[in-house]
Amino acid sequence: GDSVTQMEGPVTLSEEAFLTINCTYTATGYPSLFWYVQYPGEGLQLLLKATKADDKGSNKGFEATYRKETTSFHLEKGSVQVSDSAVYFCALAGGTSYGKLTFGQGTILTVHP
Amino acid sequence: NAGVTQTPKFQVLKTGQSMTLQCAQDMNHEYMSWYRQDPGMGLRLIHYSVGAGITDQGEVPNGYNVSRSTTEDFPLRLLSAAPSQTSVYFCASSQAGISMNTEAFFGQGTRLTVV
């Protein structure tokens, strides 16, 4: 079946540091890939998505590129802010899980001033 | 817009008790689903529904029941709570099954503790 693997966390950074959260996936066919963010005490929100190979999703300064050759969808941001502190989830839809989301484990990000 | 509303936000149950987690959406979405979130395991799909009267099992359905009598509501029932069901539960809805053109909207979650 489909699966998503995220880098081990938690991640702690200082403000304005560069962020990378790794995400790799296993799926048949051509899944769509997503990053969701969960701020403290809230539900998940869609951060960005990419629907085909080499697509780049971007939002709020975050970017991720759909790399089919490496089955990866790493999340990056050039300069993080305290307000970016949250849990980040990589997810896919499609493959054998048509219509349903398969999530990675989640990565806790804490940004200090 | 209220979006997806879950109640209650917090609940403590004793082993063996039953309860229903409520989920309602006001976006006229056909597709609704329940996930549980556990540390180190991400979100796992419990049950989902593709429309009123139609439900199906997800990855971890044991111990949970669902029904979908209306488009708006999708309650999750725990018939006999167990400590292993201690988790944070999220309800989600979308216009259709998740695809390149569909976004899922999540409720704020219900934190359930079974003692």
Image (spheres, rainbow, N blue to C red):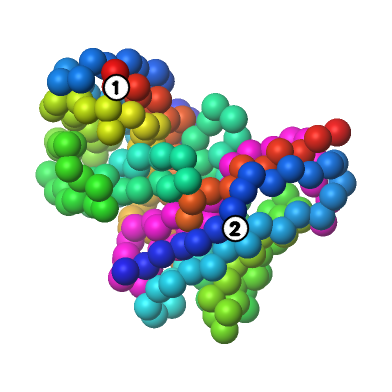
Q: Vertical placement of A113 versus A96: above or below?
A: above
- Determine which residue is flagged by label 2: A7
Residue at figure coordinates x 57%, y 84% from the top left: A69
As shown in the figure, which amino acid type bears the numbered disc 2?
Met
Q: Vertical placement of A83 versus B9: above or below?
A: below
> Position of B85 compared to A72: left or right?
left
Q: Is-magenta flag for residue B59?
A: no
As shown in the figure, which amino acid type bears the numbered disc 1?
Val
Instruction: Specify the segment rendered in magenta.
Output: A78-103
Where is residue A32? Give x, y as percent.
47, 68
**Pointer 1 and pointer 2 on the same chain:** no
Where is residue A89? Give x, y as percent.
54, 51
Q: Where's the C terminus of chain B, which quadrant? A: top left
Would residue B83 be seen by someone viewing this image from the given angle? yes
Q: Which mark is residue A43?
A: none
Give the distance between the C-alpha atoms of the residues marked 1 and 2, in whole angstroms: 30 Å
Would residue A53 be seen by someone viewing this image from the given angle? no
Residue at figure coordinates x 39%, y 80% from the top left: A29
Numbered marks: total: 2
- Determine which residue is flagged by label 1: B114
